[in-house]
């Protein structure tokens, strides 16, 4: 069966994964392997004294107990922090860079920080022995509150810095934004909390380290979002060159940004594997995930929107305090600053924009990229401003947006400080979304809900996201004549997005080969020279770019071989793969030869040996997926319980390769965005710093029955920034959903004078707003 671009091909990997034949990290075992368990600090902030390990070392099955002293002796460094060099203070000075030891040295700064590691012949014995490790702690005061950490009298986490504020960054023109406010006929102000979340990927992290003494090489098996990036970052902290390290990621059960990073456990298992001469496995449980996986969001923002008498935007001023946690994770400094720069202008004509961010350290789990990585936070700010302004001015939320949209006729648009759009038709998407959601007749539904004791509300948001660029992607195609198979190798790494399907579909369309004859391979750092990895919604245009180059090269090689075999000039030979035939044919004749026969010819030639081609692609620029979300809710007046009754979204993802997979990405993204808005929330005890929402008993997660059916459609307005015309779809739902939902809830409660509701929205919060007069 053949599929080309644009067809809703079902996922080829689903049968393998659903029937339990996936290969996740914990499914991998090696001969003679042993097991590691980490001893973690029970305190959020304490001086660390002697770590007593004598009793643990003598426990049954224990092979070793390691502390930071052992890693120091072996020449291991710190867990890498690669973003600090990108972010400067307002005066141009460097930000304060924290250092993060692989195991705690002298001090612990969050509950769950690893202090020691026990390695034993079984995981159970290692867990038992870990209870016998006795670190000495001297508790210190804690700070967990984002705003509170910035105050002068807050406990300081990093004594040598003398403050919890590690940078004070700005972007844009402060003077121009101030001038816009001075000229404004109306200024809308909002204060927002973008609540912290726990990522909670379905598959907890795991790592298996092995050392080959004969080759002096290491292998790490671990779920990642790109093996080449993981290998490179690991090379910054291990005591050996990265060329000696191979990273393998097979199936990965969810990433969402969180599995991009080097975690403490990865260098630990490599170190222990060499020390013991045996493979060492660590598998995190769900409790450890809550305490050790990077978390997301956690911003407090004050923003102002200046408008003229006609409701046209004059300027936007955004001031944010971002909580980075106890240590700066790899890209943490980048997420609130450079990642969303310009995005506070949204899809609107904004003459003046200023953004200032202060980042603070707290006694909490480190924060880093989470689906959207700074872009959802920025979109939430501008869309909440637009909604608030519409209410204050008595203008419809759709009308205010239309007045300020960048017109399609002005594309490409490159008027700073707005984003440099290459294509888009925002008015068309909004118009379609309003029609599909029956926005015009909502008041009749509001009245019907009121007769049932419900408060109905409708909200909309128009999001945009800037996806990643500036990287190089690699790919390889190999044609196996013996088995009539085409093997596809890519530097991308699926975390559940359906990559195998899309790459299969793309190659099938280019080469005309049945999808059953295509096998996709990824997740081995030794197969390709490099890979951009998965993150920032760039996978499709990066991978297809590289596969396109490889396809072109393979076809040209094949034309030369076919021409020789068919006794024709190369110029007279055409390849008919795009027409669904994997054959080379001489134009105007019946002479033809198929792809696999050409491969057999190549395999018989000593100078070729195999019929293959490599592709390298670095020409993609940023893409700008965008769209309109419309959300409808009903709130029970007596209980505060609420229900999303309708949800409509119209997106622009440029050229859509597989509508079925795109719909799945959008649905999942909306659910994650609504999860944050409806209930996900990370709570730390203010006195002890303990994570109070450290399990699924305490931490709310969205379920299928919390969600409505989603009405999803799209307009294809191709990007000009990449060869396929694609705009990334992986994070879009998460960017648009929170603002649309909050807008709907505020609209439902407007009769009670409510103008602000922060995420997460809970029935208790809504009941209090309706019945106690809180605003």
Image (cartoon, helix red, strand yellow):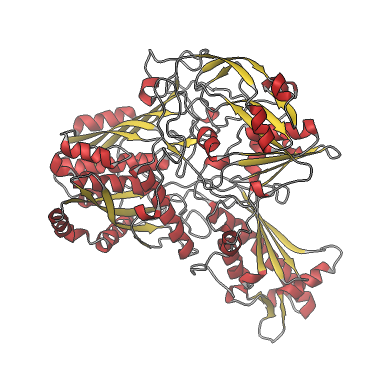
Q: On the rendered structure, is 295 left or right of 71?
A: left
- Residues 292 and 523: in front is 292
Q: On the rendered structure, is 311 left or right of 699?
A: left
Relative to residue 772, is residue 251 depicted above or below?
below
> In which quarter of the view is residue 343 placed?
top left
- Residues 673 and 557: in front is 673
Q: Residue at x 32, y 53 (%)?
A: 629
Q: On the rendered structure, is 509 left or right of 568?
A: left
Q: Is residue 240 visible?
A: no
Q: Quadrant of the N terminus?
A: bottom right
Q: Residue at x 13, y 43 (%)?
A: 751
Q: Is residue 513 visible?
A: yes
Q: Quadrant of the C terminus?
A: top left
Measured as percent of width and height from the top left, residue 261 is found at 58, 37
Q: On the rendered structure, is 452 left or right of 406?
A: left
Relative to residue 514, is residue 386 depicted above or below?
above
């Amino acid at each position: 069966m053949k599929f080309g671009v644009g067809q809703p091909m079902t996922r080829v990997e689903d049968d393998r994964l659903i029937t339990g034949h996936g290969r996740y990290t914990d499914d991998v075992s090696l001969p003679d392997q042993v097991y590691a368990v980490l001893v973690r600090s029970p305190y959020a902030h304490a001086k660390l004294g002697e770590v007593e390990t004598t009793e643990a070392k003598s426990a049954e099955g224990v092979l070793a107990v390691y502390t930071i002293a052992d890693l120091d002796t072996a020449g291991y460094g710190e867990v890498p922090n690669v973003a600090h060099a990108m972010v400067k203070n307002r005066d141009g000075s460097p930000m304060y860079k924290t250092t993060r030891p692989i195991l705690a040295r002298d001090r612990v700064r969050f509950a769950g920080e690893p202090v020691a590691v026990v390695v034993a012949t079984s995981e159970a014995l290692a867990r038992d022995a870990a209870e016998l490790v006795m670190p000495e702690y001297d508790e210190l005061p804690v700070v967990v509150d984002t705003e509170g950490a910035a105050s002068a009298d807050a406990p300081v986490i990093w004594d040598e810095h003398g403050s919890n504020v590690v940078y004070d960054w700005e972007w844009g023109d402060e003077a121009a934004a101030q001038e816009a406010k001075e000229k404004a006929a109306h200024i809308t102000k909002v204060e927002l909390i973008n609540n912290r979340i726990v990522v909670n990927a379905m598959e907890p992290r795991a790592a298996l380290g092995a050392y080959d003494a004969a080759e002096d090489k290491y292998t790490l098996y671990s779920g990642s979002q790109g093996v080449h990036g993981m290998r490179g970052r690991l090379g910054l902290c291990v005591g050996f060159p990265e060329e000696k390290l191979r990273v393998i990621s097979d199936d990965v059960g969810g990433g969402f940004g969180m599995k991009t990073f080097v975690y403490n456990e990865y260098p630990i298992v490599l170190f222990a594997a060499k020390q013991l001469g045996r493979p060492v496995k660590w598998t995190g449980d769900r409790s450890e995930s809550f305490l050790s996986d990077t978390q997301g969001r956690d911003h407090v923002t004050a923003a102002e929107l200046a408008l003229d008498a006609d409701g046209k935007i004059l300027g936007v001023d955004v001031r944010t305090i971002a909580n980075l946690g106890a240590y700066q994770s790899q890209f943490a400094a980048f997420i609130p600053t450079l990642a969303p720069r310009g995005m506070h202008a949204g899809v609107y004509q904004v003459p003046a924009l200023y953004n200032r961010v202060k980042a603070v350290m707290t006694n909490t789990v480190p924060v880093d990229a989470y689906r959207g990585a700074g872009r959802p936070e920025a979109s939430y700010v501008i869309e909440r401003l637009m909604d608030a302004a519409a209410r204050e001015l008595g203008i419809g939320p759709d009308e205010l947006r239309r007045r300020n949209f960048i017109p399609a006729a002005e594309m490409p648009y490159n008027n700073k400080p707005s984003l440099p759009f290459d294509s888009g038709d925002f008015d068309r998407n909004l118009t379609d979304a309003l029609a599909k959601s029956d926005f015009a007749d909502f008041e009749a539904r509001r009245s019907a809900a009121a007769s049932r004791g419900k408060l109905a509300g409708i909200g909309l948001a128009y999001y945009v996201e800037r996806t990643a660029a500036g990287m190089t992607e690699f790919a390889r195609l190999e044609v196996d004549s013996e088995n009539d198979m085409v093997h596809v190798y890519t530097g991308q790494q699926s975390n559940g997005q359906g990559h195998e399907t899309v790459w299969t579909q793309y190659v099938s369309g280019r080469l005309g080969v049945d999808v059953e004859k295509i096998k996709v391979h990824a997740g081995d750092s030794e197969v390709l020279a490099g890979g951009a990895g998965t993150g920032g919604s760039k996978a499709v245009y990066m991978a297809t770019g590289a596969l396109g180059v490889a396809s072109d090269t393979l076809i040209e090689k094949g034309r030369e071989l076919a021409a020789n075999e068919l006794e024709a000039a190369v110029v007279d030979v055409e390849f008919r793969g795009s027409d669904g035939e994997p054959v080379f044919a001489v134009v105007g004749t019946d002479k033809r030869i198929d792809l696999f026969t050409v491969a057999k010819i190549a395999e018989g030639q000593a100078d070729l040996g195999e019929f293959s081609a490599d592709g390298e692609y670095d020409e993609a620029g940023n893409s700008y997926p965008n769209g309109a979300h419309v959300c409808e809710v009903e709130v029970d007046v007596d209980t505060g319980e609420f229900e999303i009754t309708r949800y409509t979204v119209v997106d622009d993802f440029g050229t859509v390769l597989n509508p079925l997979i795109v719909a799945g990405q959008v649905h999942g993204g909306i659910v994650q965005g609504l999860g944050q808005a409806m209930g996900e929330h990370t709570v730390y005890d203010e006195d002890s710093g303990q994570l109070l929402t450290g399990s699924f008993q305490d931490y709310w997660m969205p379920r299928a029955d919390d969600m409505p059916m989603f009405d999803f459609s799209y307009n294809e307005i191709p990007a000009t920034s990449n060869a396929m015309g694609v705009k990334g779809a992986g994070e879009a739902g998460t960017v648009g959903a929170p603002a649309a939902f909050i807008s709907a809830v505020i609209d439902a409660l407007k009769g009670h004078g409510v103008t602000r509701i922060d995420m997460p929205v809970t029935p208790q919060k809504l009941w209090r707003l309706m019945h106690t007069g809180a605003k």
